[in-house]
């Protein structure tokens, strides 16, 4: 797969914080940001001639990020990678909802 679906902003809105102003980004937005950053880091590592071991580790981590983006309940993901908070991926957003898909 060479592309990742990006839902529109109304599906992944920022949530205003009660104290201190600012906002908290939606889980899907954060995961998309991590995917982009890891993809860019992988590209840079390849351009700089990183070892195959380093490239393989980065590639595996990128695959995990994409899997969590699609399904936040993906089994077999090490807890240290997932963090303390489970995220709601695209699958969790679509469960039980009638949606219209546009291509």
Image: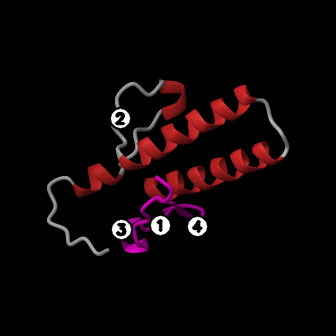
Q: Mark 3 against mark 4, which lies toward the viewer?
A: 3
- Disc 3 is placed on an element classified as helix
In the picture of the structure, the residue carrying the numbered disc 2 is 74
Residue span colored magenta: 1-26
Between disc 4 and disc 2, whose residue precedes? 4
Q: Residue at x 85, y 44 (%)?
A: 48
Query: Which label sits on residue 14?
Result: 1
As drawn, is 37 to the left or to the right of 79?
Answer: right
Give residue 16's position: percent from left, percent from top.
48, 67
- Picture quadrant where residue 75 is located: top left
Question: Mark 1 touching mark 4, by CB under 8 A?
Answer: no
The residue that mark 3 highlights is 11
Badge 1 or badge 4: first in the primary sequence: 1
User: Residue visible at 34% across and 44% down?
Assistant: 71
The answer to which image quadrant residue 72 occupies is top left
Q: Is residue 88 left or right of residue 15?
A: left
Instruction: Assign a secondary structure to mark 4.
Output: loop
Residue in the picture at 47% in, 66% down: 14
């Amino acid at each position: 797969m060479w592309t990742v679906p990006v839902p529109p902003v109304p599906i992944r809105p920022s949530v205003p914080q009660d104290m201190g102003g600012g906002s908290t980004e939606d889980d899907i937005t954060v995961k998309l940001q991590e995917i982009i950053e890891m993809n860019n880091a992988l590209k840079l590592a390849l351009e700089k001639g990183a070892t195959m071991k380093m490239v393989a580790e980065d590639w595996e981590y990128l695959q995990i990020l994409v899997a969590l983006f699609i399904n936040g309940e993906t089994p077999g993901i090490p807890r240290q990678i997932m963090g303390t908070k489970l995220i709601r991926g695209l699958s969790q957003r679509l469960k039980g909802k009638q949606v219209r898909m546009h291509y």
